[in-house]
Image (cartoon, rainbow, N blue to C red):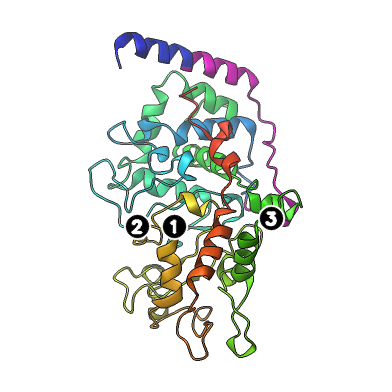
């Protein structure tokens, strides 16, 4: 970018900031969602979601100053167009080292309590601190990040609007990012519109939905994919940790690294299926490139040691050890999974980088 373009970009960004600052106040941010999502939301009493706090958090989410090389932000590994994933098996941090797990989607976090594939963080505020300071991710102590933000012309006033004074602290950085992340609500997919009787699914989508929600009972000749045991409800998310049979002995311990229990070996957080068609590759290690490969795994390739009880014995064949879905049934389930794509979510300007108007 030449110097003239940089000046124009800076002026546009400054003008946009002035417009926003004039609108900001500590009034509550309206968190709107369907009633069938439920009200078991997680907002700490000391960090209410406000309009000023969310705008500050949005700026910080896309702020490369929070990284050691001033080039990487939260948005680098969580791109809105990919439902806040990055399309890579593993992400690359400030030192060029790859992360050890696939980047998780950021969606409907308002209802979540434990974060990361191994659930090591309780609460969004704790979650936000991990990648910021991890030496292989953003690689910078939060105290250094706070010091850099204090030197920025825009952040003191944004912190003042959000928290009542210009103090920029480590806790306020993570609190503001968490406020923004709680607004990332996806609730306008074709599936949501179907639940409101404003979308008519195709026959194959309806078949996939039935399979998704049905437990197979081969003795009764009832066929199903039994996905809803772990991905049920309107949010397709139950915040469970299970071993889904990827390996007999997983090289990644999963939550066993946190709990120290052998029975937890290979157990990982079950992600939401919201926008799943946009978030390949799949699994904690990004081993599957397509939804077809995911369905093939559950249908034919489950490993049994430490396997989740939800999967053990779940089969469309009497005595089977995997689901044994037909090619057509897999196609139908994928058709339903595509119904979970929310294009409003990935194009919502309130979630975009505020520095790129």
Left or right: where 90 falls relative to 11: left
Q: Residue at x 53, y 31 (%)?
A: 56
Report, in whole angstroms, how far the alpha carbon at label 2 lies from the one at label 1.
Answer: 9 Å
**Quadrant in the picture for residue 50:** top right
Let me know if residue 46 is in the magenta part. Answer: no
Quarter of the figure that contains the N terminus? top left
Asked whether 238 or 340 is in front, the reply is 340
Q: Position of residue 92 (x, y in %)?
A: 28, 45
Q: Disc 2 vs disc 1: which is toward the camera?
A: 2
Check the image and name the residue furthest to the left: 96
Q: Position of residue 25 (x, y in %)?
A: 65, 26
Residue at label 2? 101
Disc 3 is placed on an element classified as: helix
Pointer 2 or 1: first along the chain: 2
Circles 2 and 1, Cβ within 8 Å, touching? The answer is: yes
Residue at label 3? 37
**Disc ID at residue 116:** 1
Q: Residue at x 48, y 39 (%)?
A: 80
Q: Residues within 10 Å of mark 1 (few under 14, many from 20)?
A: many
Pointer 3 or 1: first along the chain: 3
Please give the range of residues in magenta. 13-42
Q: Residues within 10 Å of mark 2 (few under 14, many from 20)?
A: some
| Residue 300 in view, yes or no | yes
Left or right: where 190 falls relative to 85: right
Let me know if residue 35 is in the magenta part. Answer: yes
Q: Residue at x 34, y 35 (%)?
A: 144
């Amino acid at each position: 970018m030449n110097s003239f373009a940089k000046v124009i970009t800076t002026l546009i960004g400054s003008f946009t900031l002035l417009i926003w600052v004039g609108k900001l106040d500590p009034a509550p941010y309206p968190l709107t969602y369907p009633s069938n999502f439920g009200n078991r939301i997680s907002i700490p009493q000391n960090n209410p979601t406000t309009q000023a706090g969310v705008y500050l958090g949005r700026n910080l989410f896309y702020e490369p100053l929070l990284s050691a090389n001033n080039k990487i932000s939260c948005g680098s590994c969580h791109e809105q167009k990919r439902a806040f994933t990055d399309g890579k098996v593993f992400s690359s941090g400030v030192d060029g080292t790859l992360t050890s797990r696939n980047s998780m989607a950021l969606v409907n976090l308002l209802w979540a309590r434990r974060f990361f594939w191994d659930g090591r963080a309780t609460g969004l505020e704790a979650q936000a601190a991990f990648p910021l300071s991890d030496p292989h991710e953003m690689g910078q102590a939060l105290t250094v990040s706070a010091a850099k933000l204090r030197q920025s012309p825009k952040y003191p006033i944004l912190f003042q609007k959000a928290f009542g004074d210009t103090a920029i602290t480590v806790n306020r950085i993570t609190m503001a990012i968490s406020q923004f992340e709680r607004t990332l609500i996806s609730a306008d997919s074709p599936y949501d519109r179907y639940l409101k009787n404003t979308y008519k699914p195709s026959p194959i989508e309806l078949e996939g939905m039935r399979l998704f929600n049905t437990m197979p009972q081969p003795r009764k000749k009832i066929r199903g994919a039994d996905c809803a045991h772990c991905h049920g409800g309107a949010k397709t998310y139950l915040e469970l940790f299970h071993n889904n049979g990827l390996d007999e002995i997983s090289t990644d311990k999963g939550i066993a690294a946190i709990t120290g229990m052998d029975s937890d070996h290979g157990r990982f957080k079950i992600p939401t299926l919201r926008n799943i068609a946009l978030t390949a590759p799949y699994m904690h290690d990004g081993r599957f490139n397509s939804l077809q490969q995911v369905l093939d795994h559950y249908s034919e390739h489950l490993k049994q040691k430490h396997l989740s009880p939800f999967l053990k014995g779940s089969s469309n064949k009497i005595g089977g050890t995997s689901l044994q879905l037909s090619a057509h049934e897999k196609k139908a389930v994928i058709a339903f999974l595509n119904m979970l794509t929310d294009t409003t979510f990935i194009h919502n300007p309130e979630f975009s980088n505020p520095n790129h108007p």
